[in-house]
Amino acid sequence: MSDKILEVGDVIYSDYSGCVDSKYEIDRVTKTLAMVGTMKFKRNVRNGWVDPYPSVVWGQRNYRTPTLDLDNAYRRYGLMSKVLAVRWTQLKTATLEGVLQIIEEDESE
């Protein structure tokens, strides 16, 4: 991805240890900074990477502009979070059997 300058409406993904778990939309900019709520980023994008401001604030998190892989990883994170939130012990046996069948079919492909 070529270098660019962040603008209002641009999206930034955040990952922690390789798990893309947050998506932010730039809501305001100054000459040198892009902001989302109280978070600040340098407006210059280097090869898809976005630097927080100040640089040492958020430690292990990485911030990047969207790619197809990041879009898919964020979508998977959201789906997995929903699946994990299901109260599996309260589902009917037929429902659980249907879920298991879908999983087994997917794994065999």
Image: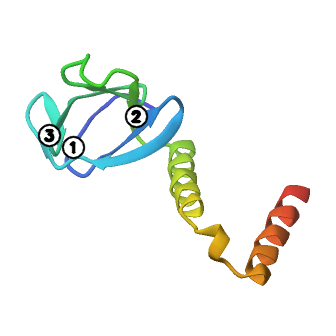
Residue of label 1: 7
Name of the residue lying farthest toward the right: 108
**Image marks 1 and 3: residues in contact by CB distance under 8 Å:** no
Secondary structure at badge 3 equals loop
State which tag comes first along the sequence, 1 or 3.
1
Contact flag, marks 2 and 3 (Cβ < 8 Å) = no
Q: Which residue is depicted at the point 80% across and 63% down?
A: 103
Q: Residues within 10 Å of mark 1 (few under 14, many from 20)?
A: some
Residue type, numbered disc 1 = Glu
Q: What amino acid does circle 2 point to?
A: Arg
* Tag 2 residue: 64
Within 10 Å of disc 3 (Cα), the crowding (few <14, some 14-19, many 20+) is few
Residue 61 seen: yes
Residue under label 3, please give it: 38
Q: Nearer the viewer, mark 2 or mark 1?
A: 2
Identify the residue shown where x is 51% and y is 43%: 70
Quadrant containing the C terminus in the rendered view: bottom right
The answer to which of marks 2 and 3 sits earlier in the sequence is 3
Relative to 45, say whether 29 is above or below.
below
Q: Secondary structure at mark 2?
A: strand
Question: Residue 4's x, y, as percent?
Answer: 31, 32
Q: Nearer the viewer, residue 109 or 5?
A: 109
